[in-house]
């Protein structure tokens, strides 16, 4: 059964999504550094973190429901902003290391502070975000301005007292996990044991302990002895939500391997291998590219996993390796445009996908700032758009439709009119409520279900 | 034919991507380059398998026609071994024989390679190809077509550069008899042209396309700073050793491999394109440059493609066409 929390409507209801908020500049000219590169709710959904290409992390906090301000129910406001990663230069290899945040993953909350892992291509950092609402006053050795006092002038001693102050949210790096990845890190995943986590790059997966930064265990290594024989790379990896010994990783060949860390120390040999046979009739130059999996996510229940490739999302039952139990077409109309998409590099876009709290619905992004939702129970799907035009408070989102040929109906948009620069790669669904966060380039849209 | 046009186009686009990847911020993206090379391989196979006179100099050795496409579902699949398979002996043996007949429109001699290609594969590819794009490249195609036949012999040269190039076969390739052109374009130190040429008898015929990733081996031999000026002599295999030693250090070495793979492809690319690109290479930005300082000069030093540019007819063609022809 789904692990959805309270507040989540029964599966199968039609969602009525409404605009709630949009964060980010409206400016047409988008600075590359402001492009959002990852979005993640924390375990309670009260915090929403975004990372961008400039290496910054912005955390939003949900306002408590307030009777005196009913309209700001559940609004997300900036809670903390900090620079997580800086650009680096690897002098040995003459390579610049981008500061872009590839992934953020929250740790379960264990005390008043919040912890998250953020990673760029090479280094993972554990950040502690804590609140400070008191300040000590009445020090002996320094005055209120902080200047040191001359000890010889001190004639009496006093005990500093704590006084309230304006809330200050501080982010401090508590651990830095570096130098463990030769290739570019694409995934991090916190284990259900809350003590370890994995990080995956193109060819290797490492297991870390959150407390230990000077070493990690390599648990998967698919680097061939001869790099000329390289045929696939790791594209995503995730720990099972409940079984701390199980994780999966996806490949550029469209396969998923499930590994059990109890069976051997090195998980090069998988326990399960998920692959759907290719449809020979749809073979093209680009078949290999579009079969590459860009994201893999376990359902909250742990019974299913979802994979995203270029044109579709697939839901797999962990007990059946031969084929997915569901396949949802995201934008099949692009299949005839693959050559152009190859040319403009869009075919390499890595879309993510996510489950809702009860695992009854899944969501993923597309182009033209469209995103798609699939209701697994009713088998219905909808295309919505994140745009400034439909950004009036609590305005309902109107379903969009792409015209694939023939006569274009009113309100439909033709495939050739799609803006491929407006891509929604990162989306997140609140773990319990029907609140979704959609990253559209440099803007973060938050939508809520009307019922909510 | 339109498949060939499309393939032609995709090949050139892919080459451009691989080249541009060198200067991308953050270093070479292994995943993307792997995908691009897979596309390149597929396109190249289609391109080469299309019936085109003169492309294959069968010669008396009777190079078998290109391998019948594999099962319909996998026209472009490589052998499980991946990119490193050596060409069959037949191909190697035949190369010297074809060499002496460079200018001859080998139409009559070349096997109709396309004949062997199961229609299913080509059709499958064609289904997704856009005729519109094919038309667009028509003009370029016809421009290339005529001289191409005559240059078929040379075409084989650089083509091989993309082909299989495992270490062990270097020596075997040597007796290619490629005229060691004294006509290297200015600015390009003469070096190991022939390495690439030697591969030419397009091993692809006999086996699934070998992706360009093989190149690192060749590049290592050709251009490593310390090696002899790229002589692909039978003793060339040892040339690789200096490179290998660099792989000892744990992570640095491993990354060298990854980096090497990509730059190797590009180095080949450069050599095929000839001097047009060597200048660009020298000016590569500091941020994006990979670590192989030695190798940086390698691709410039090694000009396997030059041999093909020696022929007057090829010199008249723009570098891109040359490269495509070379394929």
Image (tube, rainbow, N blue to C red):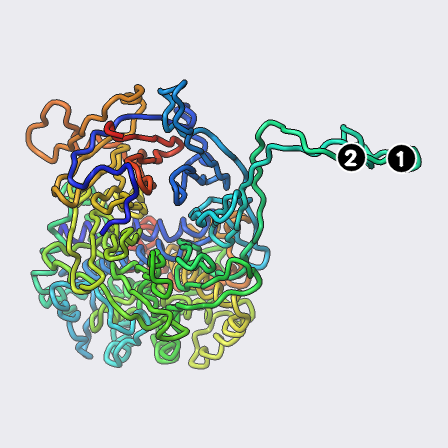
Q: Is residue B50 above or below residue A113?
A: below
Residue with the most extreme right position: A152
Q: Is residue B113 above or below residue A184?
A: below
Q: CA distance from mark 1 to mark 2?
A: 13 Å
- Is residue B13 toward the left or the right of residue B226 in the image? left
- Is residue A414 toward the left or the right of residue A268 in the image? left
The answer to whether one can see residue A427 in this image is no
A261 or A64: nearer the viewer: A64
SS at circle 2: loop
- Is residue B299 toward the left or the right of residue A380 in the image? right
A384 or A208: nearer the viewer: A208
Quadrant of residue B166 in the image? bottom left
A11 or B110: nearer the viewer: A11
Q: Is residue A69 above or below residue B100?
A: above
Classify mark 2: residues with Cα within 10 Å, few (<14), some (14-19) or many (20+).
Answer: some
Q: Position of residue A65 (x, y in %)?
A: 39, 27
Chain ID of residue with mark 2: A
Q: Position of residue B84 (x, y in %)?
A: 33, 72
Disc 2: which residue: A139
Name the residue rendered at 33%, 53% in the picture.
B15
The quadrant the C terminus of chain A occupies is: top left
Name the residue rendered at 34%, 35% in the picture.
A437
Q: Position of residue A237 (x, y in %)?
A: 35, 58
SS at circle 1: loop
Disc 1: which residue: A150
Name the residue rendered at 18%, 59% in the picture.
B46
Q: Is residue A27 above or below residue B187?
A: above
Q: Position of residue A345 (x, y in %)?
A: 31, 44
Chain ID of residue with mark 1: A
Classify mark 1: residues with Cα within 10 Å, few (<14), some (14-19) or many (20+).
Answer: few
Q: Mark 1 against mark 2, which lies toward the viewer?
A: 2
């Amino acid at each position: 059964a789904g692990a959805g929390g309270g507040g989540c409507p029964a599966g199968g209801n039609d969602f009525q999504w409404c605009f709630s908020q949009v964060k980010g500049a409206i400016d047409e000219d988008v600075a590359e550094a402001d492009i959002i590169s990852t979005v993640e709710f924390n375990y309670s959904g009260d915090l929403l973190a975004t990372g961008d290409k400039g290496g910054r992390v912005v955390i939003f906090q949900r306002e408590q429901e307030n009777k005196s301000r009913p309209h700001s129910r559940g609004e997300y406001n900036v809670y903390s902003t900090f620079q997580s990663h800086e650009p680096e230069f690897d002098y040995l290899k003459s390579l610049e290391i981008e500061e872009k945040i590839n992934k953020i993953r929250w740790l379960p909350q264990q005390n008043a502070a919040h912890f998250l892992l953020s990673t760029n291509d090479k280094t993972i950092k554990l950040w502690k975000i804590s609140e400070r609402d008191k300040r000590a006053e009445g020090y002996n050795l320094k005055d209120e301005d902080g200047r040191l006092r001359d000890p010889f002038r001190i004639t009496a001693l006093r005990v500093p007292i704590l006084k309230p102050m304006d809330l200050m949210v501080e982010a401090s790096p508590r651990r830095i996990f570096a130098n463990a990845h030769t290739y570019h890190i694409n995934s991090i995943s916190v284990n259900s044991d809350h003590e370890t986590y994995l990080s995956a790059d193109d060819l290797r997966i490492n297991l870390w302990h959150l407390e230990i930064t000077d070493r990690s265990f390599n648990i998967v290594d698919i680097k061939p002895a001869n790099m000329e024989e390289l045929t696939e790379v790791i594209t995503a990896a995730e720990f099972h939500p409940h079984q701390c010994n199980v994780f999966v990783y996806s490949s550029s060949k469209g396969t998923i391997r499930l590994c059990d860390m109890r069976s051997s120390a090195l998980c090069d040999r998988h326990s399960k291998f998920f692959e759907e046979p290719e449809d020979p009739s749809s073979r093209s130059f680009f078949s290999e590219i579009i079969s590459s999996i860009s994201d893999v996510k376990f359902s909250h229940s742990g019974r299913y996993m979802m994979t995203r490739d270029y044109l579709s999302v697939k839901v797999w039952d962990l007990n059946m390796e031969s084929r997915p139990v569901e396949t949802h077409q995201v934008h099949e109309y692009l299949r005839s445009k693959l050559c152009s998409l190859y040319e403009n590099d869009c075919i390499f876009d890595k879309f993510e996908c996510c489950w809702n709290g009860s695992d009854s619905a899944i969501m993923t992004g597309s182009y033209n700032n469209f995103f798609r939702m699939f209701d697994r129970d009713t088998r219905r799907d909808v295309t919505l758009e994140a745009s400034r035009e439909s950004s009036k408070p609590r305005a309902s989102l109107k379903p969009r439709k792409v015209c694939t040929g023939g006569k274009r109906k009113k309100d439909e948009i033709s495939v050739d009119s799609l803006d491929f620069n407006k891509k929604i790669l990162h989306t997140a669904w609140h773990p319990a409520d029907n609140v979704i966060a959609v990253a559209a380039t440099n803007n973060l849209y938050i939508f809520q279900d009307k019922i909510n | 034919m339109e498949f060939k046009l499309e393939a032609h186009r995709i090949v050139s686009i892919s080459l451009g991507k691989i080249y541009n990847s060198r200067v991308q911020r953050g270093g070479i993206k292994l995943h993307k380059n792997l995908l691009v090379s897979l596309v390149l391989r597929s396109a190249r196979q289609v391109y080469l398998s299309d019936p085109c006179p003169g492309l294959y100099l069968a010669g008396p050795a009777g190079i078998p026609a290109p391998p019948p496409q594999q099962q319909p579902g996998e026209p472009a699949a490589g052998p499980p071994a991946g990119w490193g398979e050596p060409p069959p002996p037949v191909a190697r043996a035949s190369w010297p024989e074809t060499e002496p007949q460079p200018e001859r429109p080998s139409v009559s001699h070349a096997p109709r390679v396309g004949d062997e290609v199961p229609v299913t594969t080509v059709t499958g590819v064609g289904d997704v190809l856009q005729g519109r794009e094919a038309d667009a490249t028509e003009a370029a195609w016809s421009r290339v077509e005529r001289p191409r036949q005559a240059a078929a012999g040379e075409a084989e040269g650089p083509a091989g550069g993309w082909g299989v190039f495992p270490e062990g076969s270097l020596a075997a390739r040597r007796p290619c008899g490629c005229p060691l052109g004294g006509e290297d374009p200015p600015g390009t130190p003469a070096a190991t042209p022939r390495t690439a040429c030697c591969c030419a008898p397009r091993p692809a015929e006999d086996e699934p396309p070998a992706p360009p990733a093989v190149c690192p081996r060749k590049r290592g031999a050709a251009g490593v700073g310390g090696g002899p000026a790229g002589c692909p002599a039978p003793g060339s295999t040892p040339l690789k050793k200096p490179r290998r030693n660099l792989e000892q250090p744990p992570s640095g070495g491993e990354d060298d491999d990854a980096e090497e793979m990509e730059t190797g492809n590009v180095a080949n690319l450069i050599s095929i394109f000839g001097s047009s690109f060597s200048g660009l290479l020298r000016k590569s930005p500091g941020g994006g440059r990979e670590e192989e300082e030695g190798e940086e000069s390698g691709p410039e030093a090694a000009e396997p493609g030059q041999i093909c540019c020696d022929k007057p007819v090829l010199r008249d063609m723009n570098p891109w066409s040359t490269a495509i022809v070379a394929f």
